[in-house]
Image (cartoon, rainbow, N blue to C red):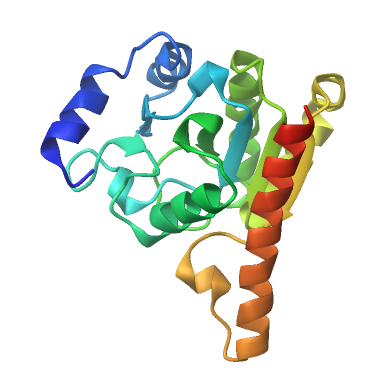
Amino acid sequence: MADAAFRASQWDMRYASHIAPINEYIDSIREPNWLPYVAPIHGGVEARVLTLLRDPGPRTQDVVGSGFLCLENDDPSAEHQGNLLTAVGLGSYDILPWNAYPWYINRAPTAAELELGVDPILEVIRLAPQLKVVLLQGGSARDSWRRVQKRAPRLVRDRRLTVIETYHPGRQALWHKDPAIRAARAADQVDAFQQVADTLNIE
């Protein structure tokens, strides 16, 4: 998103047919708190994988960032996810990025905020009928998903979603003073993304 022309093209396409239902829903929940759009390089309602992280990062902001959830954002977490996807033969269009707490706060969400994030997750799932996999990245995502399952167990069951868990892609989540633990966390991520690809290939 450092390329102004690319960012402008994404902005112009933010209501393209495959992404419009998602971004129109975002418009409906943008008051009183702001949240980023999903960039149209992602699959939107045609995506097969819902990737769930904690909250939108600083590079998603309108002024200092792109205004989008996007793997092309200028931040290490987005770059790392993109590399992991490429390594298993998947791309941006395969995924629909979302957050446990979708509004911009740039900190860990509270339990109450995670509860507020449940309905948006459920709505995104309803809007994306081709979803096969939910990839939970980090503790907040896992906590959020437990709340989703409690709130709407029938929806989750009927959609037959495969749920895969791993670490948050940010550097802080992967770092540990013990190199063996760092390596184990990195390996867990690689394995999780491979599981995503394998699940899609089975379908």
The C terminus lies in quadrant: top right
- Residue 159, percent from left and from top: 80, 21
Q: Is residue 100 visible?
A: no
196 or 64: nearer the viewer: 196
29 or 171: nearer the viewer: 171
Name above or below for residue 82 compared with residue 76: above
Along the horizontal axis of the image, is 55 left or right of 113?
A: left
Q: State the residue at coordinates (21%, 18%).
A: 12
Q: State the residue at coordinates (66%, 15%).
A: 129
Q: State the residue at coordinates (65%, 32%).
A: 118
View extreme (top): residue: 17
Along the horizontal axis of the image, is 78 left or right of 169?
A: left
- Residue 9, percent from left and from top: 20, 25
- Residue 35, percent from left and from top: 38, 34
144 or 172: nearer the viewer: 172
Q: State the residue at coordinates (28%, 17%).
A: 13
Count of labels shown?
0
Name above or below for residue 95 compared with residue 111: above
Q: Is residue 122 visible?
A: yes
Find residue 148 and report its image quarter: top right
Name above or below for residue 176 compared with residue 86: below
The N terminus lies in quadrant: top left
- Residue 10, percent from left and from top: 26, 26
View extreme (left): residue: 4
105 or 53: nearer the viewer: 53
Find residue 36 and report its image quarter: top left
